[in-house]
Amino acid sequence: MSYKAWVVAVDMGYGHQRAAHPLRHLSPTGQVINANNYQGIPSHDLKIWKRTRSFYEFVSRLTNLPLIGNWLFNQYDKLQAIPEFYPRRDLSKPSFQIREMYKWIKEGWGKDLVNYLNQEDIPLITSFFTVAFFAEEHGFKNDIYTIICDSDISRSWVAYNPAHSRIKYLAPCRRVVERLKLYGVKESNIFLTGFPLPEENLGGINLSKLRGDVAERLINLDPEKRYRKKYSETLKHFLKDIKIEAKHNHPLTLTFAVGGAGAQKILADDILLSLKKKILANEINFNLVAGTRNDVYRYFHERIKEAGLTKAYERNLNILFDMHKEDYFKRFNECLRTTDVLWTKPSELVFYSALGLPIVTAPPIGSQEVFNKTWLKTIGAGIFQDNPRCTNEWLFDWVESGWLAEAAMSGFLDGRQFGVQNIIDVVYHGVKRPDEDDKLTEF
């Protein structure tokens, strides 16, 4: 059966497009539409989006400013902060951000996009809340679904009048489900699907690729076999190809990824210098992910040169960069299959812990990332970075102890791998509780 839906994101950072990318096959065009730069977008709409994106990137980079950077960012972040969850209470009152957004929508913002989407009577799946508001306010004629990209969310994700809204939410975790209820969303419009992970990293309903990748990864993450021997029966139960006694045959592979605004690229300076001896001795493979930002690519390239690591470049030291996001996502997903440890800020990538990837978290940027960091720690799949200047010490201590192997399995066992299929089941098959079947099965 052929399923069709409009898949719409925004070109603002990576998170919203990363969430939409695994669903691109549903689109009539085979591609994700970006609401802020599609062909034919009216100049009035484009101006609003450009102002929003520029401000977003400027604010994200404030933390790099010495002395006052963090203070300035925190002042901004208070405007979009996620309120404390407890005590449970009515949080449905629209925020200042929502009220302003709806003023622009009432003036016609987004109407052109909705008119275009209404040319086909198919559902809308969007990873950005504003697009869902466009659709509802400007008369989109089919169902509206919103993919949520974080483990907790601000009030800005929910419509002005949530009790009367027809927007349906695809939640990545239980905390989001409960948060949506506090914001006044009807329970019938909330579905716990999990985050949509890349199918090319899974290997079908039996997760054949993923199980093989995790089995191989654990050998590198547990060289002393501390974890594998202690939990041998669990590993045999869930990982068909696990080799309890095997030794690793390639160096530990670390991947360091910065966000779309490139805000934490300077962390690479200390990491490179700390790992220099191990890189030159081929004791570690190190991937620096520049994404689609040429400035970050140039920065990494210059730092490699300054650190005296040119000899290792493109041998066991690599920069992942592509001009186009579709190609970048594809290359990044491929890179993750051979990655043993992912080091990144706690963005939407926290949900990639379900791929059996232990995540070392860089400092969070924004309220939602603080909650993402907490969620990742709660499920045992992530550890906050120690001093980057001492990476060569603590990273290998964590490997020797088996901590990172344990984090890898915690993410694999407690994460949700079936987000794409669950979303399809909700949108096209009317499944109300996709989470009930969202479980790993034994062999």
Image: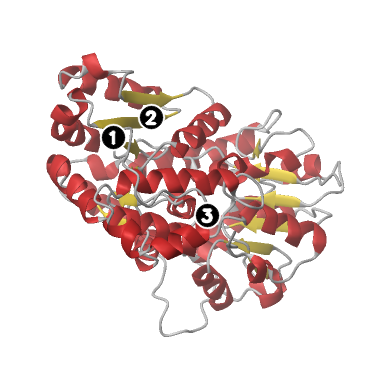
**Residue 232 horizontal/vertical position (percent):** 39, 61
- Which of the 4 image quarters holds residue 426? bottom right
Q: CA distance from mark 1 to mark 3?
A: 22 Å
Report the residue marked by disc 1. Answer: 265
Report the residue marked by disc 3. Answer: 149
Is residue 204 rendered to the left or right of residue 223? right
Is residue 207 rendered to the left or right of residue 137? left
| Rendered position, 418 above or below 220 | below
Along the line of sight, the residue nearer the viewer: 259 or 350: 350
Q: CA distance from mark 2 to mark 1?
A: 8 Å
Residue displayed at 69% across by 34% down? 31
Q: Amino acid at mark 2?
A: Ala
Earlier sequence position, callout 2 versus callout 1? 1
| Rendered position, 293 above or below 110 | above
The reply to whether callout 1 and callout 3 are in contact (CB within 8 Å) is no
Dot 3, crowdedness within 10 Å: few (<14), some or many (≥20)? many
